[in-house]
Image (cartoon, rainbow, N blue to C red):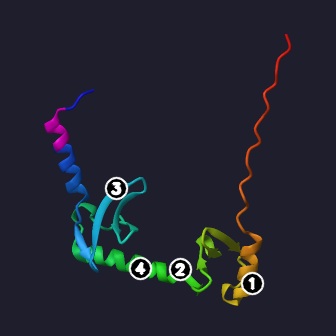
Amino acid sequence: MSISLDRAMELIEEKEKADAPIYEYDGQPVTKGVGRFGPFIKWSGMFISVNKKYDFDNLSNSDIETLIKDKIQKEKDKLIVDWEEEGIRIEKARWGRHNIIKGKTKVELAKTIDPLSITLEKAQELIAKKAPKKKTTKKKTTRKSTKK
């Protein structure tokens, strides 16, 4: 399969046009795209899904601002408790659960536990129990010699 230089340049220009910012919000460019979960806009490292109630091909500036504001509010509502000094936070999870998160370690709380009743010490204790396990190295198998 071969492609001419002119066609290659044309394809590159089309890709650049598609990736060009469509709007600017709070000094950050807004781009749009279609991923495996459908259409989205990207702003400040945040991927925001575009509902079917919006016309993705003809998004107005007010639609973009509404989508971004809704996503920011949703992220704020997700956070319940935040101990910034220790890097520990309690967030709402899916299906009515709550998670204690520190870095990449995530501890899921039972539905019966009130997340506001968790103290910093209790959160640290739960995270220490769930600390990521060290990876074990795979033992190398020894080569068996065959007898003749």
Is the residue 86 above or below the residue 23 in the image?
below
| Residue toward you, 131 or 47 | 131
Q: Position of residue 105 (x, y in %)?
A: 65, 69
Q: Residue at x 77, y 72 (%)?
A: 129
- Where is residue 31? Give x, y as percent: 28, 64
* Magenta-drawn stretch contains 5: yes
Q: Is residue 63 left or right of residue 94?
A: left
Q: In this view, does 34 lie above or below 44?
A: above
Q: Name the residue under label 3.
A: 34
The residue at which mark 4 appears reads as 72
Gap between marks 3 and 1 measured at Cα: 42 Å
The part of the image, by quadrant, that contains residue 48 is: bottom left
Cα separation between marks 4 and 1 = 29 Å
Q: Is mark 3 on a helix, strand or loop?
A: strand
Q: Nearer the viewer, mark 3 or mark 1?
A: 1
Q: Give the range drawn in magenta.
A: 4-9
Quarter of the C terminus within the rendering: top right
Q: Is residue 11 magenta?
A: no
Per the model, the C-alpha gap separating discs 1 and 2 is 20 Å
Asked if the residue at tag 3 contacts the one at tag 4, i.e. Cβ–Cβ closer than 8 Å, the answer is no
Q: How far separated are the C-alphas under marks 3 and 2? A: 26 Å
Which residue is located at x 39 percent, y 69 percent? 45
State the residue position of label 1. 122
- The mark nearer the N terminus, 4 or 3, is 3
